[in-house]
Amino acid sequence: MIKKLSTLLFIAVMVFADNVDAQIPSLKNVFKNDFLIGTAMNAQQIEGKDAAADELIKQQFNAVTPENCMKAEIIQPGWDTYNFDLADKLVAFAKKNNIKINAHNLIWHSQLPGFMHHMQSADSVREYFINHITKVASRYDGKVYSWDVVNEALNEDGTLRKDIFLDKLGDNYIVEAFRLAQKAAPHTKLYYNDYNIEQPKKRAGAIALIKKIQAAGVRIDGVGIQGHWKAGAVPMADIEESIKEFSALGIDVMFTELDLSVLPSPWDKVTADVSETAQGSAKMNPYTKELPDSMQRVLAKSYADLFTLFMKYKKQIGRITFWGVNDGQSWLNGFPIHGRTNYPLLFDRNFKPKRAFYSVIATAKNH
């Protein structure tokens, strides 16, 4: 039924998109009774140096996630040195514009402060771990809506990633991260965030992890499925099963970094591991000037299918966040091959809505 409905929506939106007037609908208003609609904000936008992006954010979104400024290497560059400037500016922007912040993130194996790379002592890692979570989370309690407490801690087979935290603190470190965050930020939602956790093996690992946190009597409020997928090959059945299984744990489900790549992958695997890189070629970068109409339609159809599914489970889903404001600002222009031209979002490089935007809007109008 979903597939049939989304196909009808897609046909209708193709006509609508080609005849749209100057009045652009607002995502946050269209879905205001369903779930929050978010975007990622970069430093330029937070500092007010990208006026076009900031206006679009205020018009379209009621939630934001900082792309980098709350990650450890930025917010704690030295052992006793914290840089809250950009994060504070984000809080001010969000408060002024009635936008909720998902703070991102407290514990992650990547983008760590430089001093962490030289640590050998478990006691030093533990001291950093406790101090970082406590100081950063407590500062923004009541100022941000939610925290990604732990980010990307799982391997593809569902086992724990072998990183500095697992190595030095043991396999209970994630429970302890949530325990510390719960104490430091009692008025803030606490989430686990990862990519590919809609896939069965990794999903099972995430479910086991969430159950372990809950069994310890520690609060976890939700799980974030990142949503870095490929247009025309979105794993719909796995996504639906994930919504069901995660929500059955009594927690909210979010889609936290949504973008749909239109470019060929250099690998058979699907990953969003920022450490992965590949060599480029003309074949890997086919749309340097513009996205052809045929691919615009594929992208729009994929977004229509996704949001039709999201609307079916709107009671279980708390937020949908796009990872970037427009195509030109997407991280996928540089991942996993540097210098490519990708078109994964709803707004083009001139901040104009694409067919995919109207395909998303249409799913709300039909519920």
Image (cartoon, helix red, strand yellow):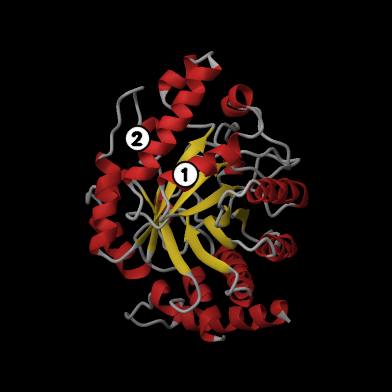
96 sits left or right of 163 in the view: left
Image quarter in which the C terminus is found: bottom right
Q: Three-letter amino acid code at disc 1?
A: Ala
Residue 181 - label: 1
Q: Nearer the viewer, mark 1 or mark 2?
A: 1
Q: Three-letter amino acid code at disc 2?
A: Ile
Instruction: Give the quarter of the image for residue 260.
Output: bottom right
**Which residue is situated farthest in the front direction here?**
217
Using the image, determine if residue 81 lies above or below residue 147: above
In front: 110, or 25? 110
Using the image, determine if residue 178 lies above or below residue 58: above
| Residue picked out by circle 2 | 75
265 sits left or right of 140 in the view: right
Using the image, determine if residue 340 lies above or below residue 358: above
- What is the secondary structure assignment of the residue under circle 1? helix
CA distance for labels 1 and 2: 16 Å
| Residue at image point 24% right, 48% down | 89
Using the image, determine if residue 79 lies above or below residue 193: above
| Residue at image point 59% right, 22% down | 168
Question: Residue 112 location in percent, x, y?
Answer: 46, 28
